[in-house]
Image (tube, rainbow, N blue to C red):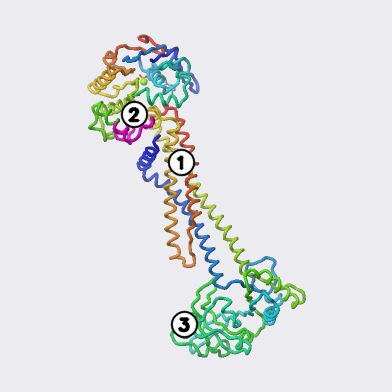
Amino acid sequence: MISLKDIKKSYILPKVTVEVLKGIDLEVAEKELVAIMGPSGSGKSTLLHIIGCLDRPTSGTYILHELDVSLKTDNELAEIRNREIGFVFQSFNLLPRFPAWKNVELPLLYSGVLAKERKQRAMEMLLKVGLSHRAEHYPNELSGGEQQRAAIARALINEPAIILADEPTGNLDSRSGREIIDIFKGLNKEGVTIVLVTHERDIAEQAARIITIRDGVCQSGCY
Amino acid sequence: MDIIEIIKVSKDSLMSNRVRSFLTMLGVIIGVAAVILLVSIGEGARTYIHRELGNLGTNILIVVPGKTSAKGGFHPPEASTIRKLIYDDALLIKRRSKHVDDAVPVMLGSAMVKYLNQSRDNSIVGSTETYFSIRNLKVDSGRFITGSEVDAKRKVCVLGRTVKKDLFGDKNALGALVSIGDSKYRVVGVMEKKGVTLGIDFDDIVFIPTTAAQELFDTDRLFNITIKVKSANELHEATEEIKQILIKRHAGKEDFTVMSQDEMLGVMNKILNIMTAVLAGIAAISLVVGGIGIMNIMLVSVRERTREIGIRKALGAKNSDILLQFLVESMTLSLIGGTGGILFAGAVSFVIPYFIEFLPTQLELWSIVLAFLFSAAVGIFFGVYPARKASLYDPITALRYE
Ligand SMILES: Nc1ncnc2c1ncn2[C@@H]1O[C@H](COP(=O)(O)OP(=O)(O)OP(=O)(O)O)[C@@H](O)[C@H]1O
Ligand SMILES: [Mg+2]
């Protein structure tokens, strides 16, 4: 379902050009749960952003659902992010001025779902991640684990086929971290493809496959 | 995308920075209010002048001594060099012109007016029997000077309200003898209250027959000849006719000026239009400045919410969604500001006449609509740049922004 061929990404800075990804080949099949590991600065986040259509590679081909992403317009990429991919960030990235359920319904706003249905579905998702009692709480009134669960509910609300998580447990204690991983594993059982970037080996070992990135190239587990 | 939701989000974000939003709106409020108020004052001044001139009679031509090239305006008679207008000029116009109802020789001067131990230095107007009806003046008690009194140079007078009050208090003035200058005049009438019209206080005048005034001031030089033309569409012919008559009498020289009140009105209208336009223009500039304020605050807001923009984009917001979001926000600022400005201007123009009596403000619908549309346009115009900037943010860069 996800297929990257010779993906390169470089950043052109005033003095130097930094090549972050130096030709990544990667396959992720449907309903897989894979973990990406690698030292800091090796390009894991960059890779995940490309997979998530948040960023475009400098060169190489990325086939998502048999379609070449490089041929898509920005608006089409926005639609893909909206409907097919759910993003979970290390720093949660909830909007501080909105209560939990408003944060959760956000993606539905951009897929034209009406207010009443949005709220209803947001509440269902919060229930699913065990946060329905915190629906009216603002992000700063939630614990880190709760914030991450709200963020996961938000990622799930449009029923995407793929969840991409960039160090989702990085800011959490080990107990909350385990809860989050359990949610992911449950989702994976339901058939959601999950790509998880992590620094923690015991979390990575929960995945069926571990991909290791080093210096912008794939070291192991890319197939 | 759901426009109601966009408006709600705008409201939330504006409300989360109340003071800032209010100060930004204040710029628009002041601009819009200034445009509407200045137009309303201009229109008020126009109606005021129309009404006042109407108050002083219609279809009136005034002949003053001396020739000026410009039409309209006021001309002080420069006594020494110009040939004067005299009583017979007025009689001749009345007799010869077909378009003229009446021609009143008017004299103006001042003299001491005394009754018992009360005295005041007063404006004296010499006129004939028809002056009152021409000038829309009315007596409160008694009557105005008659034609026979004029012809017989009778020493009679009609007192303005203030003069009567000063000299007589609440006592009856009719039939009393007041001294004007060195002679005694019999009071035959007291004027109805007229008030100040175009800067002339008609209540502060004593009217006597022109013939008596000639004696009082010891001259036959008229202040002007006030002419009542039969109808409005004869004004032009009447003017020409009067010119012909007087030129012939004045040895072929046009050494006088025929002014029409309507011409004066036209000139004043023109001046007022220009003034209103200039002032509204200046006010519009302040509206533009208000718009720059909006742009400034929107740029700050876009920067502050960079991360929010990144998050929204990551969740599937298109550039157009973000653009619309910020555009609605700047328009909300400018439209609320515009509405506030309209309300403020309405309140002020309602209150002004209570403080400045002679300034009847008149709220003009077109200026309200114009100011409102202009403020909306300002909101869009100055909102586009920040909104576009926001919409073009790269999602990753925006997400990384701290
Ligand atoms: N916008 C950018 N401009 C220049 N260099 C960048 C930019 N974004 C990322 N980089 C560089 O790319 C490299 C990889 O960054 P990336 O965030 O993908 O690393 P990572 O593997 O996720 O590291 P970490 O585990 O610390 O999150 C880093 O060296 C970083 O400096
Ligand atoms: Mg990273």
Mark 3 neighbour density, 10 Å: few (under 14) some (14–19) many (20 or more): some
Q: Are marks 1 and 2 on the same chain?
A: no
Q: What whole-number distance in Å separates the C-alpha atoms at marks 2 and 3?
A: 84 Å
Q: Chain of mark 1?
A: B
Which image quarter is the N terminus of chain B in?
top left
| Mark count | 3
Of labels 1 and 2, the one closer to you: 2
Q: Is residue A107 magenta?
A: yes
CB contact under 8 Å: marks 1 and 3? no
Region of the chain picked out in magenta, as a range: A91-120
To which residue does mark 2 refer?
A93
Up the image or down, A209 lies above or below B24; here it is above
Q: Amino acid at mark 2?
A: Asn
Q: What whole-number distance in Å separates the C-alpha atoms at marks 1 and 2?
A: 27 Å
Mark 2 neighbour density, 10 Å: few (under 14) some (14–19) many (20 or more): many
Of labels 1 and 3, the one closer to you: 3
Relative image position of residue B357 (x, y in whole percent): 47, 67
To which residue does mark 1 refer?
B296
Left or right placement of residue B281 versus residue A21 in this view: right
Q: What whole-number distance in Å separates the C-alpha atoms at marks 1 and 3?
A: 63 Å
Up the image or down, A27 lies above or below A131; here it is above
Left or right placement of residue B73 versus residue B117 in this view: right
CB contact under 8 Å: marks 1 and 2? no
> What is the quadrant of residue B97 in the picture?
bottom right
Q: Chain of mark 2?
A: A
To which residue does mark 3 refer?
B165
Mark 1 or mark 3, which has the lower sequence index?
3
